[in-house]
Amino acid sequence: MDKILKQTWWDNNLPDQRMFNTFLGWIGGTDAASKVKFRSFLKDKDYKSIIDIGCGPATEYEGFKKDSIDIQYTGVDSSEFLCNYNSNRGVPMIKAEAHSIPVEDSAFDVAHSRHVLEHQPDFRPVLDEIVRVASKLAVHIWFHKPEDKEIIDHDSSTNLYHNFYKKEDIENHLAQNKKVQKVEWLNVDEKENILLIWLN
């Protein structure tokens, strides 16, 4: 199985306005529960910069403004359509694959991703990159909560993965990274949870 996926679904489908509207409904606006919980957690912290990996339509750029969180935001997405959509709204963007972002190690205080790892054939390359580019905290918000079983679900007709990963595998992988100090899981609801990775 390939460990790296060249994403195609977004650029193939989102230029259709009806599909783009459907997509926005899937990911939720700034008031989505996991986004609200993450911003509430972040609000009283003294972080200066955040990179949002696989940012999609960059709703958190608006969310931080809405909640008066003063943090320098940079979005990353591999989709040309989404990069153009965000740039045209004034969102600072980097067009890159989530596993290979052209920034230095520890370039941002916080690295954040949401609903990204479940779309990968293997969580490890992108999770490693999220940790690499952060200096203080790496975060992933899961829409498929990692539990006790791995399920790799690939739809070849759309080139999309909707995977479940094992919590133990994720924790064991992170434990091998010398940059990782500890991990913490925050429950959002029956579907979502937040992985906080505190860094040395």
Image (cartoon, rainbow, N blue to C red):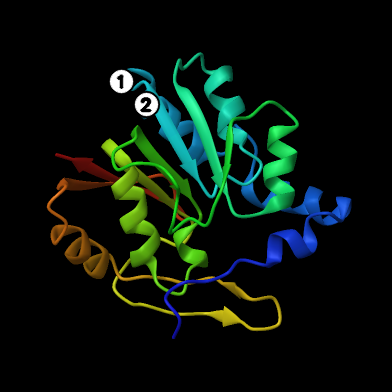
Could you give the CA–CA distance between mark 2 and mark 1, rounded to whole angstroms?
5 Å
In the current view of this chain or complex, which residue is farthest to the right?
17
- Front residue of this view, candidates 70 and 68: 70
- Front residue of this view, candidates 195 and 103: 103
Seen in the image, is 70 located left or right of residue 195? right
List x then y, in percent, for residue 36: 49, 32
Amino acid type, residue under disc 2 in the picture: Leu
Q: Mark 1 Cα within 10 Å, few/some/many (few <14, many 20+)?
A: few
Q: Quadrant of the N terminus?
A: bottom left
Question: Helix or strand or loop: what does disc 1 sit on?
Answer: loop
List x then y, in percent, for residue 98: 48, 55
Query: How many numbered dots are placed on residues in this image?
Result: 2
Q: Mark 2 Cα within 10 Å, few/some/many (few <14, many 20+)?
A: some
Tell me the residue at 44%/48% (across/down).
189
Amino acid type, residue under disc 1 in the picture: Lys
Rendered image: mark on residue 14: none
